[in-house]
Amino acid sequence: MSFMLQDRVVVVTGGSSGIGLETVRLLLAEGAKVAWCGRDADRLAASETAIKEAFPNGQFMTRICDVLKADDVEAFAAAVASELGNADCLINNAGQGRVSGFDNTSDEDWMAETSLKLFGVIRPVRAFINQLLASDIGSITNVNSLLAKQPEPHMMATSAARAALLNFTHTLAHEYAAKGVRVNSILLGMVESGQWRRRYQERSDTEASWQQWTGAIAEKRGIPMGRLGRPEEPARALVFLASPLASYTTGATLDVSGGFGKQL
Ligand code: NDP
């Protein structure tokens, strides 16, 4: 069964690495036209080179854009409309987590984390909403974390900000349901990607291989499936929720955590 996204325009924020990049790959394999952004020019260029190699006939564009900067995001939305056409689907993936507890999270850290998780979605939604409303399959799909429902002390600010994003996603879904734009999110556990690669580089046990290091994390954290997720696994969930295959689903969350989610 196809995702029914042939020639549709899909926007992925933070598409230059990890889950975002795997989502871009899957969308292009499905025949969609894809636009993605990131802040770092070299990382964005590297992702474009890799995609060009894999999809020489693919229709895509990239743009340097910080999702926290309103001007960047507005310019990105205008460029998508003129280069690829009206956006049908927006996938809000850009971001990263913050490891800190109450005693080492300053007011500035709280502000930065809350801002990233909320405005990192609010700004792209505001910039693209008119394009999505004009589509007959409009959708917004947000990458969120299990921390939204299952907070952890060592990621206190991220957990609180993720809960706010989940709440916002739900109300946004209700506001736009009758206007034809679906809004959903995925809740991630731990997925191998850029963030974890960076943490691996900084690990204390320098003897451990990537497999050993990630396997030990999965075991210690009690992930029932015994491993971290692979970026293509959340990518498939994102593309499903964004696509017309999920045409009667809005305001929903899809757990992609290898069984780590404890809620019924
Ligand atoms: P990566 O670091 O591999 O990818 C993050 C992507 O987002 C990069 O392309 C990065 O590019 C981009 N990005 C980050 N901040 C911004 C910004 N302000 N504006 C535009 N682009 C930005 O991480 P993952 O693939 O793991 O993460 C993807 C999403 O999943 C993130 O939102 C993350 O918080 C979330 N998540 C991941 C989990 C995991 O275990 N991997 C767990 C829970 C949630 P650049 O830095 O160049 O801007």
Image (cartoon, rainbow, N blue to C red):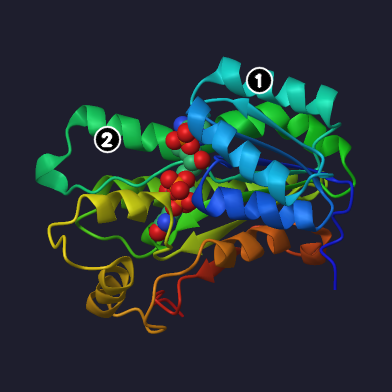
Most distant residue in the front direction: 53
**Residue occupying the far top of the picture:** 71
Q: Which mark is residue 110?
A: 2
What is the x, y in percent for residue 260? 39, 76
Of labels 2 and 1, earlier in sequence is: 1
Q: Nearer the viewer, mark 2 or mark 1?
A: 1
**Mark 1, residue position:** 74
Image position of 132 with respect to 1: above or below: above
Residue at 19% over, 47% down: 100
Q: Residue at x 36, y 59 (%)?
A: 147
Q: Residue at x 55, y 60 (%)?
A: 186
**Element on which disc 2 rests:** helix
**Quick check: is the Cβ at mark 2 less than 8 Å away from ligand 1?**
no
x and y percent of residue 97 in the render?
35, 47
Q: Residue at x 14, y 46 (%)?
A: 102
Q: Quadrant of residue 222?
A: bottom left
* Mark 2: few/some/many CA within 10 Å (<14, 14-19, 20+): some
Counting labels gives: 2
